[in-house]
């Protein structure tokens, strides 16, 4: 699945929202195996890789900063924390626009996967877990290959990725 959905790579180095330059691709970063198994790549943003979770119960995505050894938001320097918030807002706007959801849930929990990752979940009042958290509420329901490709493509379009 990964090879068919390789994310478009943005030019490096990237300019953060505060104007500083960064090149996280130069670090020894790698994606945690659990995230790699459960997601499909969407796009690399200036700080983070955006991934779509392969669970059709809820439209949800995850932002993973492209920096090694980062477990908590406070592990990022101030410029990268600011950039992460910019990217969270950008992804929230895209997901809300695509889904027309009733509520967005944003979380950086990391009890199972220690690598810093920020989940953005589009919630509806009639979803399987409403109003409770989505974790463990229903077994994951993988997208069909076409559905996942369409979701990734729609996200790329909403984020103006070419």
Image (cartoon, helix red, strand yellow):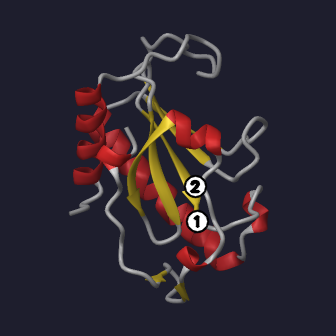
Q: In terms of depth relative to the viewer, which is nearer, 29 or 137?
A: 29
The picture places residue 41, in percent across and down from the top left corner, at 41, 48
Kindly identify which residue carries mark 1: 66
Q: Can residue 40 be seen in this view?
A: yes
Label 2–label 1 contact, CB within 8 A: yes
Give the vertical position of 145 relative to 76 (above or below): above
Numbered badge on residue 38: none
Q: Quadrant of residue 55?
A: top left
The answer to whether 3 appears left or right of 84 in the picture is: left
Q: Distance between the residues labelled 2 and 1?
A: 6 Å
Residue at image coords 36%, 42%: 95
In the picture, the quarter occupied by the C terminus is bottom left
Q: In which quarter of the image is residue 64?
A: bottom right
Numbered badge on residue 64: 2
Residue at image coords 60%, 53%: 31
Q: In terms of depth relative to the viewer, which is nearer, 23 or 91?
A: 23
Q: Give the farthest residue toward the front.
A: 3
Residue at image coords 41%, 21%: 142
Give the vertical position of 116 relative to 134 (above or below): below
SS for dot 1? loop
The answer to whether 61 appears left or right of 72 in the picture is: left
């Amino acid at each position: 699945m990964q090879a068919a959905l390789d994310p478009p790579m943005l030019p490096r180095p990237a300019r953060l929202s505060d104007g500083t330059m960064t090149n996280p691709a130069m670090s020894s970063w790698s994606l945690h195996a659990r995230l790699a198994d459960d997601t499909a790549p969407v796009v690399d943003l200036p700080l983070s890789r955006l991934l779509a979770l392969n669970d059709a119960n809820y439209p949800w995505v995850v932002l993973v900063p492209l920096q090694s050894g980062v477990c908590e938001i406070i592990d990022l320097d101030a410029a990268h924390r600011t950039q992460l918030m910019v990217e969270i807002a950008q992804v929230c706007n895209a997901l809300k626009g695509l889904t027309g959801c009733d509520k967005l849930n944003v979380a950086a929990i990391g009890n199972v996967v220690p690598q810093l990752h920020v989940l953005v979940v589009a919630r509806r009042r009639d979803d399987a877990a409403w109003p409770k958290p989505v974790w463990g509420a229903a077994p994951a329901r993988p997208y069909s290959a076409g559905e996942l490709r369409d979701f990734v493509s729609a996200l790329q379009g909403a984020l103006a990725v070419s």
